[in-house]
Image (cartoon, rainbow, N blue to C red):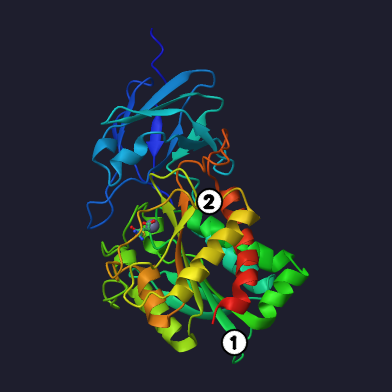
Amino acid sequence: MTVPATLLLISADFDSGNIELIDASEPGNVRLAIRPDTRSQHFQWFHFKVSGMTPGEHYGFSLENAGQSSYNKAWQGYNAVASYDHSTWFRVPSRFDGQALRFDLEAREGQVWFAYFEPYSRARHEQLIARAVNDAGLELLAVGKSAEGRDIPLLRKGDGAPGKRKLWIIAQQHPGEHMAEWFMEGVIERLQQDGGEELKALLASADLYLVPNMNPDGAFHGHLRTNAMGKDLNRAWQDSSAEHSPEVFFVQQQMNKHGVDLFVDAHGDEEIPHVFTAACEGNPGYTPRIAELEQAFRSHLSQQTKDFQTTHGYKRDQPGQANMTLACNAVGEKYDCLSLTLEMPFKDHDDAPDALTGWSGKRSAQLGKDVLSTFAHLIPKLR
Ligand code: GEM
Ligand code: ZN
């Protein structure tokens, strides 16, 4: 009697899971497809579990619709992440033939998870909020609600006293860009652990307004780009609504209430293997003062860490040609303040590559800590 190949089980019915099974009968070529975002054509994020593997055996996986994904050119030079315990992740060599993304694994254990990037779970988000309030002295200033009713906490470090600068960081408008909430974990961890003079000086003259996850519905559903209403939140900053983009609507209400003196919007980028910022050079109200602040931010952060650079990034917008529906541009224009999109790679930061992990949650968190030093440096110049 031939021993049947153990049945491979593929699952994605968990927080931020996304995969559709085509055929798992051949362990050397498990055929899969990525599911699009709800009410949207966008897709690229994947996250799934394989169980029933035999340690020592070779397995091959193929994401067969990768060639139709939102940023399909970005698969060149990309390596998927894998984990045997859903906690420690490593890169697996991947190859893209223009249609399918393929990767192989010689199993070390009976189960493994694969993902587009190291996921930041809702459970970890809840722990982060509790840690922020209980151990890092942040106030739960307000709680918005997503389209499906999930909490969107706005945290504040500081007492909101008049005259203090208001420094805002929001993260993960694009739900598949999980590096953004890892970044926020680093910010909060430093606020919890660092009693040094630099942070004391920062907090003496500024309050931090933090939204660790702008898009909990999209993150939970394994979306790349949209909320549960199919809306790209980073295109909703001129016409947000309680019905289609309640997440942005809530944050804009809070910004109007408290004010903004500096804004950072944390994202991930599919294609460019570097950490970089995009700014407001295309805004109608762009001034030399803002240009100098952008330059000061970039040069200070470049000196702070090898995990940031200013050579690679998006093409600069032409004067007056900015897309004002983006958070960075809308907030920079409305509050006449330094306003930046911070991009972290799904691949690696090629200026300081890490062969085992590529860009990772840990490196995103460290960048969050480093950005606070750049905030401290900029405080005297913001207004
Ligand atoms: C990007 S932000 C695009 C900014 N482009 C320029 N030229 N300033 C988006 O929303 O498309 C952020 C992201 O998705 O990571
Ligand atoms: Zn984004």
Residue 14 versus residue 73: which sits nearer the camera?
73
Which badge, 2 or 1, is on the more N-terminal residue?
A: 1
- 352 relative to 344 in the view: left or right: right
At 40% from the left and 18% from the top, the residue drawn is: 5
Residue 317 falls in image quadrant: bottom left
Q: Is residue 156 visible?
A: no
Helix or strand or loop: what does disc 2 sit on? Answer: loop
Identify the image quadrant of residue 162. bottom right
Question: Could you say where residue 179 lies in the image, as x and y percent from the top left?
Answer: 49, 53
> Is residue 232 positioned above or below 92 on the image?
below
- Left or right for 103, reference 303: left
Image point 60% across, 49% down: which residue? 362
Dot 1, crowdedness within 10 Å: few (<14), some or many (≥20)?
some
> Which image quarter is the N terminus in?
top left
| Residue 328 seen | yes
* Relative to 382, 69 lies left or right: left
- Residue 192 location, x and y as percent? 70, 67
Residue at the disc numbered 1:
160
Q: Amino acid at mark 1?
A: Gly
Viewer-side residue, 109 vs 165: 165
Three-letter code, disc 2: Gln
Looking at the rendering, in which quadrant would you find the C terminus? Answer: bottom right
Numbered disc 1: secondary structure: loop
Q: Residue at x 63, y 86 (%)?
A: 159
Residue 124 got which mark? none
Disc 2 target residue? 309
Disc 2 to disc 1, C-alpha distance: 33 Å
Q: Residues within 10 Å of mark 2 (few under 14, many from 20)?
A: many
